[in-house]
């Protein structure tokens, strides 16, 4: 019996090759897209899940609230972790990480490399995070100052096949670190990636970070992770954190008196990648909304493919009605007919799955390059993924075959053989499904248009400075910072260098915030300002526009002591709407618990508002003041327009002459800002790609249905042509029904797309208005593609010989 069913199924596939191709191709593309999105989503939600104690690990984060400002940072003060472990039995262990803001130079003998993966870590790292050590003892590896654990990749890079244990790595040509362990390379799907872990207690002995106090309780500058004891409640502990941390800070700084409130909280390790968007994240994170969007897109594409599959199956069902009648006359039972139709449908679905798996395998390299992932075929054949895809294919086959199976098997043989059945059946259902298909396609097309419109807007947005033609060079250590002025004087002689300056922060990079208040304001009224501690010529180099006053200048020696320039937002926040009112005003730091309070600062200028972060964030109050070279982390070099390659090469050569043995690490400032929108750009690219595929799949189905409808109306078309109907009128007759369906889909999709994109745009502080032109272009585009798809079959039918048509049974 099964052999007979298979023969009939294969015979039908050969007989209706075009129908089989369209059905298999549409479902295969849908399954392939769904599989790719499923792999992407699975990779995103599994971040940090490889740690055995992940469910008990929490990151300590803090919200700082003043009467006039708010900061949410991923960092915490260095002493909080050890203090909490000592004070609360719920905290089983604590570990701190301090990665540098820049890359550092690491050397061994004649090998010298610029590395971004160096970080300082507590000796408890391997107790909290079960990172396997392939060499060395986990408990002792990071206990001694100037010890370092390297990854397997770095061990091979620096030492080759030699034993790395006991070897000495030189950090920035002056600090010697002894290798005490080799750890396995950290998995890609974690929210931090380090190649070197050096003993944290080293920072308490040498001023690697310019003399920063790594035992202080006030300022959040490290990343702290807590391992809670078995059975400990994170919520209960979190309720105790506020008073405890406030007490730590209050011992050194009068919080209440200065109007500060510190609110620490525990962030589950597994939530960091998708649900954390704090200042100074250890690495750029993902976004849960993006995952949900693409999961929905994957489901919709799969639905469209399955709808095609069902539509074509139901449309073709009438052509087999006579076959059903003959089988019933010959003694076939209804159950056997149901098995026949369901079997054929499942066979097609499984064939589509095989094609889909081949497509996924071919597409994975390009998909990985686009998304920045490293998904392999092993992920595709995972015990949860492949069986899931098989189940989806089987479900699609059973669902698509169910209508013809149960509908046709119920026919009475006499009625079928007399031709009393209405051809096709299920016409209303097919129309509804076509509307659904094109509705989804239109939502994706409109969404893609809005995303690209917004991205073009933020990239062309006035930032308050000129980000073009600016090279940003990192100063990684006290030694290159000490040689900065010599380097500046050296490169100012280059013909294509316009200006040079330096600062503690770079736009689109890590930020510093300082609290300030007008001296006349109450002591508990402080504003948080983004702070840039800079050299002279900062405003000229960045091409910032002054709104009032002047910049910090070497012509005014007092500027090096207390001169400050604020932005427009800060001036308005302090109540100086007329910016000239700000000139000469004094701003004070909060008072500490000692007599060494900082003197007030004097406003010498107001600069036009400028963006320190992406367009997702409102421009914040900001200040720029002069500082000595040890505060500088970035050098800014403005170049003349043109080809920068020769000038960058000259900058590098000058660096090697003035600051030998240190890496020349540079980037262009516009690249810094492009990185801020990388996730948004990925959304736009993938939406556009999948929107195109949904249109392709939907049009495959339209092509099949148009072919079927033209075939069903062959005699009608012949009669019309005999009576004098033109080719154009017949094409219009066959096309107008599909035009109505696409128009109905637009009416349904437009409000859905508008609401979805309006919500997405709410995530931007600076955003475009949703343009009606995007809806018009998407609607016309979908209609045009649909008409082109249908018109081929319509024209073919209209040009057919009416004599042949009238002979059709």
Image (cartoon, rainbow, N blue to C red):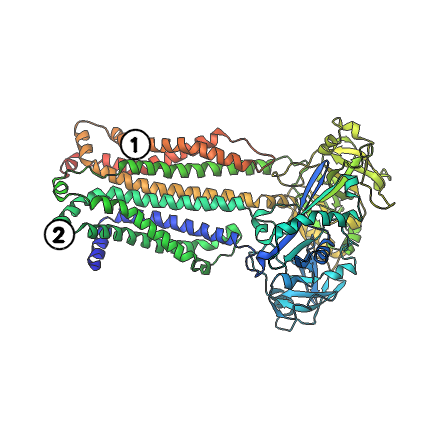
Q: Disc 2 designates what residue?
A: 331
Label annotation for residue 737: 1
Between 579 and 131, the one lying in front of the other is 131
Q: Is residue 658 visible?
A: no
Residue 617: x and y in percent read 63, 38
Between 226 and 491, the one lying in front of the other is 226
How crowded is the residue under tag 2: few (<14 C-alpha within 10 Å), some, or many (20+)? few
Residue sitting at x 71%, y 38%: 69
**In the structure shown, which secondary structural element does the residue marked by tag 2 occupy?**
loop
**The image quarter in which residue 422 lies:** top left
Looking at marks 2 and 1 on the same chain, the residue that comes earlier in the sequence is marked by 2
**In the structure shown, which secondary structural element does the residue marked by tag 1 occupy?**
helix
**The image quarter in which residue 166 lies:** bottom right
Q: Can residue 721 be seen in this view?
A: yes
On the picture, is 107 further left or further right than 11? right
- The quarter of the picture where the C terminus appears is top left
Residue at mark 2 to residue at mark 1: CA–CA distance:
40 Å
Q: Above or below — where is 663 with respect to 460?
A: below
Residue sitting at x 79%, y 57%: 207
């Amino acid at each position: 019996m099964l052999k007979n069913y298979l023969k009939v199924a294969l015979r039908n596939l050969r007989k209706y090759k075009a129908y089989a191709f369209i059905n298999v191709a549409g479902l295969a593309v849908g399954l392939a897209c769904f599989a790719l999105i499923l792999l992407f989503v699975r990779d995103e939600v599994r971040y940090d899940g490889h740690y055995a104690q992940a469910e008990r690990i929490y990151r300590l984060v803090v919200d700082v609230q003043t009467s006039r400002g708010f900061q949410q940072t991923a960092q915490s003060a260095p002493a909080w972790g050890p203090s909490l472990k000592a004070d609360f039995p719920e905290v089983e262990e604590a570990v701190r990480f301090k990665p540098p803001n820049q890359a550092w130079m690491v050397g061994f003998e004649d090998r010298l490399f610029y590395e971004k993966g160096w970080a300082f870590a507590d000796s408890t790292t391997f107790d909290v995070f079960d990172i396997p050590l392939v060499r060395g003892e986990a408990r002792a590896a990071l206990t001694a100052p100037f010890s370092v654990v390297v990854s397997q990749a770095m061990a091979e890079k620096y030492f080759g096949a030699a034993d790395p244990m006991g070897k000495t790595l030189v950090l920035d040509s002056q600090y010697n670190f002894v290798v005490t362990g080799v750890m396995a390379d950290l998995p890609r799907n974690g929210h931090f990636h380090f190649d070197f872990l050096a003993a944290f207690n080293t920072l308490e002995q040498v001023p690697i970070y310019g003399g920063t106090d790594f035992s202080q309780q006030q300022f959040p500058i490290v990343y702290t992770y807590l391992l809670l004891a078995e059975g400990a409640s994170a919520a209960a502990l979190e309720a105790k954190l506020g008073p405890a941390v406030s007490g730590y800070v209050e011992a050194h700084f009068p919080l209440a008196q200065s109007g500060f409130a510190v609110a620490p909280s525990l962030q589950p390790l597994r939530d960091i990648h998708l649900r954390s968007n704090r200042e100074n994240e250890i690495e750029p994170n993902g976004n849960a909304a993006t995952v949900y969007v693409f999961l929905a897109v994957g489901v919709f594409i799969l639905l469209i493919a399955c709808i095609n599959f069902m539509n074509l199956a139901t449309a073709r069902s009438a052509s087999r009605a006579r076959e059903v009648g003959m089988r019933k006359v010959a003694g076939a039972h209804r159950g056997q007919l149901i098995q026949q139709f369901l079997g054929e449908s499942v066979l097609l679905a499984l064939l589509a799955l095989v094609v889909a798996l081949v497509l996924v395998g071919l597409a994975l390299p390009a998909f990985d390059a686009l998304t920045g992932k490293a998904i392999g075929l092993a992920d595709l054949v995972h015990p949860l993924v492949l069986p899931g895809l098989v189940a989806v294919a089987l479900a699609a086959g059973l669902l698509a075959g169910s209508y013809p199976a149960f509908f046709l098997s119920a026919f009475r043989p006499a009625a079928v053989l007399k031709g009393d059945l209405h051809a096709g059946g299920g016409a209303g259902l097919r129309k509804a499904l076509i509307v659904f298909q094109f509705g989804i396609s239109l939502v994706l097309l409109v969404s893609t248009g809005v995303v690209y419109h917004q991205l073009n807007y933020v990239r062309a947005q006035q930032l308050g400075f000129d980000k073009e033609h600016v090279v940003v060079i990192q100063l990684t250590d006290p030694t290159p910072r000490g040689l900065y002025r010599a380097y500046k004087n050296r490169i100012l002689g280059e013909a294509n260098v316009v200006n040079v300056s330096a600062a503690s922060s770079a736009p689109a990079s890590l930020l510093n915030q300082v609290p300030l208040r007008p001296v006349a304001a109450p002591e508990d009224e402080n504003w948080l300002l983004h702070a840039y501690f800079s050299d002279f010529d900062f405003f000229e180099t960045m091409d910032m526009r002054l709104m009032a006053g002047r910049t910090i200048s070497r012509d005014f020696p007092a500027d090096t002591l207390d001169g400050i320039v604020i932005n427009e937002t800060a001036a308005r926040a302090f109540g100086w709407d007329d910016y000239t009112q700000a000139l000469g005003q004094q701003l004070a730091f909060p008072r500490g618990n000692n007599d060494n309070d900082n003197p007030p600062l004097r406003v010498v200028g107001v600069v036009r508002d400028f963006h320190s972060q992406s367009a997702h964030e409102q421009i914040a109050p900001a200040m720029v003041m002069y500082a000595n070279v040890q505060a500088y982390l970035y050098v800014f070099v403005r170049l003349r327009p043109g080809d920068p390659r020769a000038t960058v090469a000259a900058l590098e050569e000058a660096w090697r002459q003035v600051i030998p043995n240190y890496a020349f690490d540079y980037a262009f400032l516009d690249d810094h800002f492009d990185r801020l929108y990388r996730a948004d750009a990925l959304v736009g690219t993938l939406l556009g790609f999948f929107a195109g595929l949904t249109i392709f799949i939907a049009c495959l189905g339209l092509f099949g249905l148009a072919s079927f409808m033209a075939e069903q109306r062959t005699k009608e078309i012949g009669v019309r042509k005999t009576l004098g109907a033109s080719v154009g009128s017949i094409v219009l007759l066959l096309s107008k029904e599909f035009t109505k369906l696409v128009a109905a889909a637009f009416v349904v999709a437009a409000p859905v797309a508008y609401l979805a994109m309006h919500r997405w745009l709410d995530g931007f502080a600076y955003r475009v208005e949703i343009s009606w032109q995007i809806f018009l272009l998407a609607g016309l585009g979908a209609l045009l593609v649909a008409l082109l798809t249908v018109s081929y079959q319509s024209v073919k039918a209209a040009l057919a010989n009416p004599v042949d048509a009238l002979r059709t049974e």
